[in-house]
Image (tube, coloured by chain):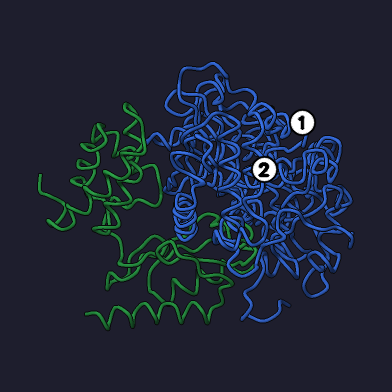
Chain colours: A green, B blue
């Protein structure tokens, strides 16, 4: 199986895993599976099967168990995602403050439906369950960082900023 | 209520309240040395005497939970702080993590000493990335200051504390699912008994406590259990945090006296300041979307465990969601039900199948396709998951089944005429079933 990481990434992965594995008792090293999957995703953007195998080896677990975990939690991407992930909360408090309108607007602006990736691979747009910022509804997260009290204007600006940022780097 | 003064939130939003120095400057880390001079059993007795009840949702007496941990177990004991705040409408723990993380750290140190714990894990929902970073910083400061490490404040008590990020699953807020997840598995709740206090993390005695619960412990030690208890009612000590969202003028987290009614919380100027546009309240979710909805005629009840229990309701996680008279109750219930259909872990058949059925039936009614027999069907599905009243008759391993059932029971029972209107008119009669965004202007 091909190595999922570059040499530098491999070193980072090994170091980070050691740190997490040390937190758990003998016989409980499987506890580092969730942190391990986060590390793989942070390093290469998603979790390919090869990444799961690496996590499994470190955690004295089978790849099957790691796959089961990876597929259970919504923050793990077992297929490539956009460079950025926008999670828009549409749960009750956000919906009471216009999240449905926000979602429709963002779908239109990005030319995708919920759960899809934009053609330029820049953004994965998702509908998300309660993000825990209901007092500042409606809210969304970009790569797990909060944007609160959203308006249509702020959403436009956010998308523009992400596009500009990407343009600069390329 | 103007004479009410908060005890938990008084340092919030002060400069650097989230740092070790800021916390100390506001009187922090005074309780830990006091606790270390006490016997562990004395601390547990104090927490019992304070009448502190778990703030995660179930309201179980905290001191009693701690006392269930066997004293003579040869196994290591663990403390798990539940920061998997995911109950729709709830955001108080996030505010604690942002504004007062060291109060949580001090609480962890005191609780660990009292229970006999050398390793504590803070299980935080994966989406709280920024909050996990704040915790990592606070923990590093604690090691630096000798609060954590080989010898807590030179007492000889060793304590290590770690942050552990979840990865997006509501069910992991259930304490046994949290333990499964922490062990690196999918979050499937365990059958109880055995309870975590006896067989918990890695098969060892474990206490799982909510962030706010642990955050309250230093205050109890500092002001004295009796003084803390006296702030509350006979069975619910102290003050509590509520998170108000939805159609109110001033949403946010409020520390309230246990005697405060929902009416006062929503309408009084010193609290939420009423409803935007001078509209009227139609309904209120009193304790997270898992709690039965309150009809606007029920809002004189106190936002407190016993008072709510007396009307077959629950204080839950303190999430108060206010819906004004422009809200479509069918639409609101559909959104709530969609959540449970999405988040059911799939382990128990009534919940796995029932949540999806309920969501579909409610959606059908909202979209104008409903028939009168659908309401009977909905009732039969919901009764298969958890009949009601009272709360707690669920047929599933964990309370998610009950949580999915309670809104369906209560919305349909208390607002049946709206469901029937949708069916009779073959459409949703509300021009704006939900609210509108700030820059869309005022609704018509």
The residue lying toward the viewer, choosing from B296 and B53, is B53
Q: Look at the image and tell me in which quarter the N terminus of chain B lies.
A: bottom right
Marks 1 and 2, how far apart at CA: 31 Å
The residue lying toward the viewer, choosing from B255 and B71, is B71
Mark 2 — on which chain does it sit?
B
Mark 1 — on which chain does it sit?
B
The residue lying toward the viewer, choosing from B173 and B417, is B173
Q: Earlier in the sequence, mark 1 or mark 2?
A: 2
Using the image, determine if residue B78 lies above or below residue B251. above
Residue B245 seen from this side: no
The x and y percentages for residue B272 are: 78, 65
Mark nearest the camera among 1 and 2 is 2
Dividing the picture into quadrants, the one containing residue A55 is top left
The x and y percentages for residue A130 are: 55, 55
- Residue in the picture at 71% in, 79% down: B442
The x and y percentages for residue A167 are: 27, 82
Dividing the picture into quadrants, the one containing residue B429 is bottom right
- Residue in the picture at 40% in, 82% down: A160
Q: Secondary structure at mark 2?
A: helix
Label annotation for residue B217:
2
Q: Look at the image and tell me in which quarter the C terminus of chain B lies.
A: bottom right
């Amino acid at each position: 199986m091909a190595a999922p990481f570059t040499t530098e990434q491999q070193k980072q992965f090994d170091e980070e895993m050691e740190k997490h594995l040390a937190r758990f008792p003998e016989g409980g090293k499987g506890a580092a599976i969730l942190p391990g999957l986060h590390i793989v995703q942070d390093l290469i953007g998603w979790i390919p099967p090869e990444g799961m195998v690496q996590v499994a080896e470190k955690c004295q677990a089978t790849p099957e168990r790691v796959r089961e975990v990876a597929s259970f939690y919504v923050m793990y991407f077992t297929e490539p995602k956009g460079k950025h992930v926008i999670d828009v909360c549409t749960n009750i408090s956000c919906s009471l403050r216009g999240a449905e309108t926000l979602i429709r607007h963002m779908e239109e602006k990005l030319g995708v439906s919920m759960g899809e990736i934009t053609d330029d691979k820049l953004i994965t747009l998702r509908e998300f369950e309660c993000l825990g910022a209901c007092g500042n509804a409606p809210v969304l997260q970009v790569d797990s960082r909060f944007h609160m009290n959203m308006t249509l204007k702020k959403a436009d600006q956010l998308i523009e900023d992400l596009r500009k940022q990407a343009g600069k780097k390329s | 209520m103007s004479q009410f003064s908060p005890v938990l939130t008084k340092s919030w939003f002060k400069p650097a309240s989230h740092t070790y120095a800021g916390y100390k400057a506001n009187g922090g880390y005074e309780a830990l040395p006091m606790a270390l001079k006490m016997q562990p059993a004395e601390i547990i007795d104090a927490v019992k005497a304070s009448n502190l009840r778990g703030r995660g949702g179930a309201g179980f007496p905290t001191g009693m939970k701690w006392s269930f941990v066997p004293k003579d177990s040869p196994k290591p004991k663990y403390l798990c702080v539940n920061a998997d705040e995911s109950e729709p409408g709830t955001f108080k723990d996030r505010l604690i993590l942002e504004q007062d993380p060291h109060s949580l750290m001090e609480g962890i140190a005191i609780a660990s000493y009292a229970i006999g714990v050398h390793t504590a894990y803070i299980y935080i929902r994966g989406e709280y990335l920024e909050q996990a970073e704040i915790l990592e910083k606070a923990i590093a400061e604690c090691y630096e200051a000798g609060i954590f490490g080989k010898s807590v404040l030179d007492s000889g008590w060793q304590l290590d504390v770690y942050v552990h990020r979840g990865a997006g699953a509501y069910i992991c807020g259930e304490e046994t699912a949290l333990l499964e997840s922490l062990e690196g598995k999918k979050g499937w709740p365990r059958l109880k008994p055995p309870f975590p206090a006896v067989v918990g993390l890695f098969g060892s005695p474990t206490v799982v406590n909510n962030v706010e619960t642990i955050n309250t412990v230093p205050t109890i030690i500092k002001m004295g259990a009796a003084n803390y208890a006296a702030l509350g009612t006979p069975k619910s000590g102290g003050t509590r945090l509520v998170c108000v969202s939805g159609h109110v003028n001033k949403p946010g987290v409020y520390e309230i006296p246990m005697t405060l009614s929902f009416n006062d919380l929503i309408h009084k100027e010193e609290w939420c300041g009423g409803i935007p546009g001078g509209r009227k309240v139609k309904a209120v979710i009193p304790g997270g979307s898992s709690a039965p909805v309150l009809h606007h005629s029920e809002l004189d009840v106190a936002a407190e465990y016993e008072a709510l229990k007396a009307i077959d309701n629950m204080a839950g996680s303190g999430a108060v969601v206010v819906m004004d008279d422009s809200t479509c109750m069918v639409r609101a219930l559909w959104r709530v039900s969609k959540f449970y259909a999405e988040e059911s872990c799939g382990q128990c058949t009534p919940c796995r199948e029932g949540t999806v059925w309920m969501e579909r039936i409610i959606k059908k009614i909202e979209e104008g396709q409903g028939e009168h027999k659908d309401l009977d069907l909905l009732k039969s599905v919901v009764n298969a998951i958890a009949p009601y009243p009272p709360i707690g008759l669920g047929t599933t391993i964990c309370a998610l089944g009950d949580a999915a059932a309670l809104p369906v029971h209560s919305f349909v029972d208390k607002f049946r005429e709206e469901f029937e209107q949708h069916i009779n008119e073959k459409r949703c009669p509300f021009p704006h079933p939900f609210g509108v965004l700030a820059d869309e202007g005022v609704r018509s």
